[in-house]
Amino acid sequence: MNKVTPFLMFNDQLDAAIEFYTATFPNSEVRNVARTGKDGPISSAEFVVGGQLFMGYNGGPYFSFSEGVSLYVDCADQDEVDEYTFESTDPRSAAQ
């Protein structure tokens, strides 16, 4: 897994977004999919669009898609999480 991965939030359109983007751009694929129940809708997924890895999540009406993007950071342990948390909340750092 990449160290930092764009993380897209949807209401319930993740499946449609994955289908559209992977069909539109070459070098795209679906890597992992988690469903609600055995045959239920997609709840989260990892997918590649044009060679870039993305993570997506269907969060319901509280997490509808927006122009904003979150970044998922893969950390080895709590110390690494704490290090990034401190850096991102340091008032001397650039605006987030």
Image (cartoon, grey):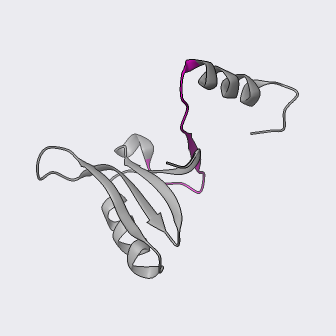
Q: Is residue 75 on the magenta stretch?
A: yes
Residue 34: percent from left, percent from top = 26, 47
Residue 72: percent from left, percent from top = 54, 42
Q: How many marks?
A: 0
In this picture, residue 31 sits left or right of residue 51: left
In this rendering, the answer to whether 80 lies above or below 3 is above
In this picture, residue 90 sits left or right of residue 22: right
Residue 87: percent from left, percent from top = 75, 28
Quarter of the image holding residue 81? top right
In this picture, residue 23 sits left or right of residue 6: left
Residue 7: percent from left, percent from top = 51, 49
In this rendering, the answer to whether 82 lies above or below 93 is above
Q: Farthest left residue?
A: 38
Between 84 and 13, which is closer to the camera in this rendering? 84
Between 66 and 14, which is closer to the camera in this rendering? 14
Seen at 73% across and 30% down, the residue is: 88
Between 16 and 78, which is closer to the camera in this rendering? 78
In this rendering, the answer to whether 13 lies above or below 7 is below
Q: Is residue 20 on the magenta stretch?
A: no
Between 66 and 76, which is closer to the camera in this rendering? 76
Q: Main secondary structure of the magenta part?
A: loop
Seen at 49% across and 56% down, the residue is: 54
Seen at 21% across and 53% down, the residue is: 41
Work out which quarter of the rendered image holds the C terminus and state it: top right
Magenta residue span: 64-78
From where the camera sits, is residue 13 visible? no
Quarter of the image holding residue 75? top right
Q: Farthest right residue?
A: 92
In this picture, residue 23 sits left or right of residue 94: left
From where the camera sits, is residue 57 visible? yes
